[in-house]
Amino acid sequence: MGLLDRFRKFDRPEPPEQVTVEAIGWVRNDVGKPRPHGWEDVESRIEVLAEHAERLRGIEEYSHVVAVFYMDLAADAPEKPSTLPVEGVETGILATRSQLRPNHLGVAAVALLGVEGTVLRVRGLDAIDGTPVLDLKPYLPRYDAHPDATIPGE
C-alpha cells in the first residue's frame, strides 16, 4: 500500500449480519461457576493453541493484556433479560457487566503475571474454567486508560 492509497476513496462493503469466530485458547482456573463479584485476585492461565504461538511474540513485554472471551454458559441461560436491577435501579443489560448480554462476549484488562510458551498467567480475569478465549491484545494506557471516567453513584 503506497502513500497515495491512503487518500483514495474507500467504498465500504456491506457489513455481515452474522460473524463467526473461533477460540484461540481457553481459560484455566479453579472457578467452576459464574459469579458476579470477587474476581480481582483470581489467578488464571490462558492456554493458547500452539498454532498461535508466533502471534504471542512480544506479549511478555507488557504488564497487562486485554482478553476477549465468550461466556459460553450464558448462551444457554433460560432468561434473556433486557434489564437487570443494579443497586435497586432497573438498568439496561448493556449498561451492566452481566454475562447475559446479547452476544455473551466478555472483555477484561488483566495483569499479565508471566508467559511460558503459549500459556499466559493472569490475575483478575472474570471468566470461569474452560471459557473460550477469542482474542488477546496488549493493554495500552494511552488508548485503554481513561482517568476521567465516571460511573453512576460514585
Image (cartoon, rainbow, N blue to C red):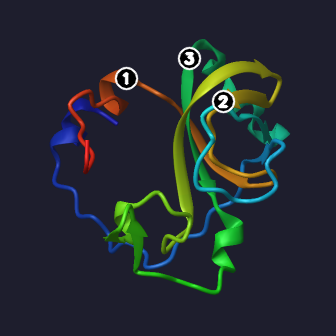
Mark 2 surroundings: few (<14), some (14-19) or many (≥20) residues within 10 A: some
Q: Quadrant of the N terminus?
A: top left
> What residue sits right under mark 2 in the picture?
123
Cα distance between the residues tagged 2 and 1: 18 Å
Mark 3 surroundings: few (<14), some (14-19) or many (≥20) residues within 10 A: some
State the residue lying farthest toward the front: 88
> What residue sits right under mark 1 in the picture?
141
Q: Which mark is residue 62?
A: 3
Tell me what residue is drawn at x 22 percent, y 40 percent.
6
In the figure, is residue 61 to the left or right of 24?
left
In the figure, is residue 154 to the left or right of 137?
left
Cα distance between the residues tagged 2 and 3: 14 Å
Q: Position of residue 71 (x, y in %)?
A: 65, 62
> Disc 2 on helix, strand or loop?
strand
Q: With respect to residue 83, does 67 lie above or below?
A: above
Amino acid type at mark 3: Tyr
Q: Position of residue 82 (x, y in %)?
A: 40, 80
Circle 2 or circle 1, nearest the eye: 2
Tell me what residue is drawn at x 16 percent, y 54 percent.
9
| Res 93 quadrant in image | bottom left
Q: Quadrant of the C terminus?
A: top left
Q: Position of residue 14 (x, y in %)?
A: 33, 74
Dot 2 or dot 3, earlier in sequence? 3
Q: Nearer the viewer, residue 113 or 18?
A: 113
Circle 2 or circle 3, nearest the eye: 2
Tell me what residue is drawn at x 68 percent, y 29 percent.
122
| Res 17 quadrant in image | bottom left
